[in-house]
Image (spheres, rainbow, N blue to C red):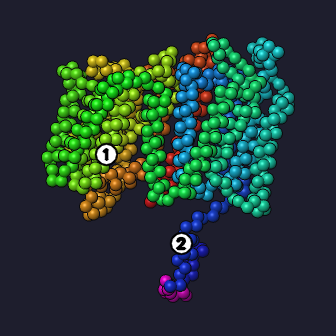
Amino acid sequence: MDDAAGAPDTTAAGPADPVDPAVVDTAAVAATRARPAEETYRSAGEWVRKNLFSSPFNSFLTVAFGLLILFVARGLLNFVFSEERGWDAVRTNLRLIFTHAYPEEQYVRIWVCVGTLVVLTGLSLGLFAGRGDGVQLKRISTALVGFGAVIALGVVLREPSVLVGADGAVLREGDDVVRQSFFEAMADRWVWWLTAAALVAAGLSLRRAIASARVSITSLPAVEFAVALLALPVLSAWIYPWGHFAFVDGAFIAEPGRTVAMSTKIPWTVMWLLAVAAMALGRVMRRGFGEQQQQRMRIVLNLLWLASPFVLYWVILRDPHLEWNRVVAVDIPMAVAFAVLGGAVLRLLTRPGIGEMGRIIAIVLLGVAAFNWVAAYFGWYSMLQKARLSFLLLSLVALAAHNFAGEIVKRRRLVAAWLVLVAIVHYFATLMNAPSTVETPTEALIGGFAVTVIVAVFTIMLSFPLGVLLALARTSRLPIFRVMATSYIEVIRGVPLITILIFFAIILNLFLPVGMEISLIASATAGYTLFSAAYLAENVRGGLQSVRRGQFEASDAVGLSTTQRTVFVVLPQALRASIPPLVGQMIATFKETSLLAIIGVFDLLRMANSVIPAQTQFLGIKREGLLFVSLVYWVFAYTLSKQSQRLERRLGVGER
């Protein structure tokens, strides 16, 4: 049989001569291996022939789906840009859509929260975002040409505009509206034609400059490029007449020929400047810090990100009113007592040689903590909720204390962690029990998009550790943990989410101790957390099953305990393998917050579907608001998906 075409002829070469390691340039070999493969850029015609018209069947699919896309795009364009659409309802109620009835005189608190997140994002990007290869200029040129072509196609697809009379009413002939002719419409859209032509010309010019090597760079830094793009909408707020639409003292104001209000321009300009300054500071710190200092800053920033939702909501947005007499007389002494006594108990449980007696004491503490909650339900004796919570936390930490037994350094770290935990828990518990000084016309502090984000963020933060514990329990060798975790997961997954939300919103308070009641948003967050944790547990369990048996054996060989093996060897690999389903669950959780409207929360969807259409000026206008809400959900879901793909590429998920 003949050799395959292109196969090397080795019949006359004889055995391969050995390579002398002394003559091999190891640096050159390493550089060659590290050098990424060069991308092959094809012309537009070559790409179209290869990917869209490579065969008759592919050509048919391309034409069929192309026509379908054009049909859908034409309908969407005609809906969005029609003069009959009531987009004033959305423009006027943007504040209502994003924060509901949060008082205008307290709105600086909203901007403080946004600014805090912007600063944290800028510092994180400046300190830790790798520059990489950046954004390729060829990709930018292709995007410019593509956007220009899409704009030109949209101008052609959109039907001629409706004629409007001097009074602003749409002209009609019978039941039909009066429209421009096609050529009049094309002439009136000269600004769009000019924009499309400018984009295409800029893209082609950039491509020719790259081909002729007239530019010395081939890419732009990705982060800086993104920040520069964000400057465009901020700049447009100052120069483009987007219009001013608002309710002032109950009166509707529509000024379509002017720029947006200063209360919008200035805050967003400040946010962009904060992002630039924070990112620049992060770059300076990155160049000035060593590896060890950068690692410490990474830990500090992660802790700040973790604490930011609690601080921003409970401290900034609520502005709680503290009764300092009670704080000094009750709250501080209780925190000090639990810190001191709990620290003493943990030092006892980590004493060398305590052995199984430490575990027995921890189990007894857990029983006492559980009995306190049972007693509260039946009203056997009174106890502050913070005390019950502190007993529960002490018992849980005591169960893990045996992992820190022996060395004095480990014991001190455990006690220090306990002191910090007590301080944080008692601080936020005090803030939660204090009344808010922010007065709103509804029982909820905030609504709209803000409450959607708040519920989604707290759900993800609380359900993730719970889901990991459930996954570990379901894969445990101890039957009691395995049965309990399996029962919980299967029961929760078998019940519709809306049923759980209704239960927590309406029925949960009936099972709480006398005098204890939680708000509607807290009830909904608890329901979302328990529901999401069951699905996250199954995602993590799939990752745990992907860890090879050799990893367990290697951990046992070096003398790691079960906890150390799980925390330092098994879980990192399992979570890495679980990134795609975990991010998918996060996206699903964010979108499932739309069910909040059913239980009476004024969330993003309810604003567009119920509140705005009930206003006298915009009575019955729903579709525009619902389309805007859909766009908001898509932007956030798409952003999470793209960040997940970047993280997967960085960690090599699915490659090794």
Q: What element carries label 1?
A: helix
Upstream in sequence: badge 1 or badge 2: 2
Q: What element carries label 2?
A: helix
Q: Which residue lies furthest to the left in this view?
A: 357
**Extent of the magenta region:** 11-21
Task: Let me know if residue 189 is in the magenta part.
Answer: no
Is residue 49 something that shows in the picture?
A: no
For the residue pair 69 and 650, the one nearer the viewer reads as 650
Q: Is residue 51 above or below residue 471?
A: below
Residue 44 pos. (x, y %): 72, 53
| Amino acid beneath label 1 | Ala
Q: Report which residue position mark 1 lands on.
A: 416
Question: Which residue is found at the position 70% from the left and 59% from the top?
Answer: 217
Quarter of the view holding residue 264: top right
Q: In this view, does 260 lie to the left or right of 93?
A: right
Query: Which numbered circle lies on residue 30?
Result: 2
Residue 226 pos. (x, y %): 64, 46
- Dominant SS of magenta comes to loop
